[in-house]
Amino acid sequence: MKVALALLAVAVAAAAFVVSCPASYRVERSVLVGAHPVVVAAQITDLKRWLAWSPREPLDPGARRRYGGTASGVGSSYYWSSTAGLGRGRMTVLAASPQLVEIELEMEEPRPSVADLEFRMSPEGNGTRLTWIQAGSLGYVDRALRALGHADRDIGLELEQGLERLKTIAEAEGRVKVYRLERSARAEATPDDVLAHLADLRRWAAWWPRESIDPEMRRTHGGAPSGPGASYYWSGNYQAGQGRLTVLSASAERVVIEMETERPMRASVDLEFRLSPDGKGTRIVAVVSVQRTGEREGGAADPDPIPGSELEKALARLVSVAEARPP
């Protein structure tokens, strides 16, 4: 009887100790990455890329995986289900920029839990200081593990492994030249008026300066008439080149366009237009991010990406057509 009472007392004391432990946790790790913040952020905001660097993905290469929402960035989601260590859960991107990415992680198995993943990126020297923070709530079992020192240690180890893998991949991609440009303008038009000219790629001929480079340029449109999925293909003379535009997302606050060029050089260009009310008008911020992925035809020096003067001209024309209130 005395032994049983003693064991009971120990169990009660242990339970009381576990209950007294904090019901939340926060683990932080960082690494210096020899790549531009835009390159680093691209590895995080595109959830399909996590397969290459996430420390948990190798636990079950055969897990069932599917993706939803936008192709990348805010609103994109990743769902997985596994019986071999990954469990079942979901990740959703809540915020995405070259400075900060926020992701919600919800686990259903092996134990229900919710965590916030935060990635902070800041320039440091010629690279990026990348900080990964994971914070969340703890159930009774997790609090017991944390009381034994396992939770922080295991999560911290996973974060360190993930950061090192991400560092390797980002630095390899970072050797590709990256260019970023930002310009802004104000239009005496509503965000919806501006959106109409951005999301419908057929309307770009009225304001995008490069449309006038080659009057005989061949143009075709595909996908949706307007908004996400709308595509525009062009092929012209050497200066106009050849490529494709695709609308990835479009709202009264933000339009994201992907541009892939084949000539005069291969490059991947992200065009982002941020729209915000400004008095009775709209403030338009255009951001161009370019990753050059090949040499110019003939081995000549790389051509300049979209220059600031061209982006300024594009915004001026966009303002003009938006203020004209299209029918």
Image: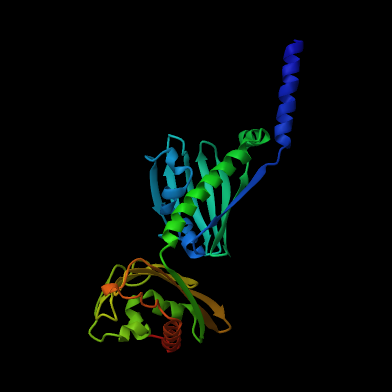
Q: Is residue 232 visible?
A: no
Q: How is the image coloured?
A: rainbow
Q: Quadrant of the N terminus?
A: top right
* Residue 24, image x, y percentages: 66, 44
Closer to us: 27 or 84: 27
Closer to us: 169 or 283: 169
Horizontally, is 123 left or right of 297 in the view? right
* Residue 11, image x, y percentages: 71, 23
Horizontally, is 182 left or right of 257 in the view? right
* Residue 222, image x, y percentages: 27, 70
* Residue 193, image x, y percentages: 44, 81
Placement of 249 over or under 197, stated as above or below:
above
Q: How many marks?
A: 0
Placement of 295 over or under 140, stated as above or below:
below
Q: Can residue 40 be seen in this view?
A: yes
**Which residue is depicted at the point 39% across and 41% down?**
61
Q: Quadrant of the C terminus?
A: bottom left
The image quadrant of residue 22 is top right
Closer to us: 286 or 42: 42
Placement of 248 over or under 20, stated as above or below:
below
**Which residue is depicted at the point 49% across and 59% down?**
40
Horizontally, is 8 left or right of 101 in the view? right
The image quadrant of residue 68 is bottom left
The residue positioned farthest toward the top in the image shown:
1
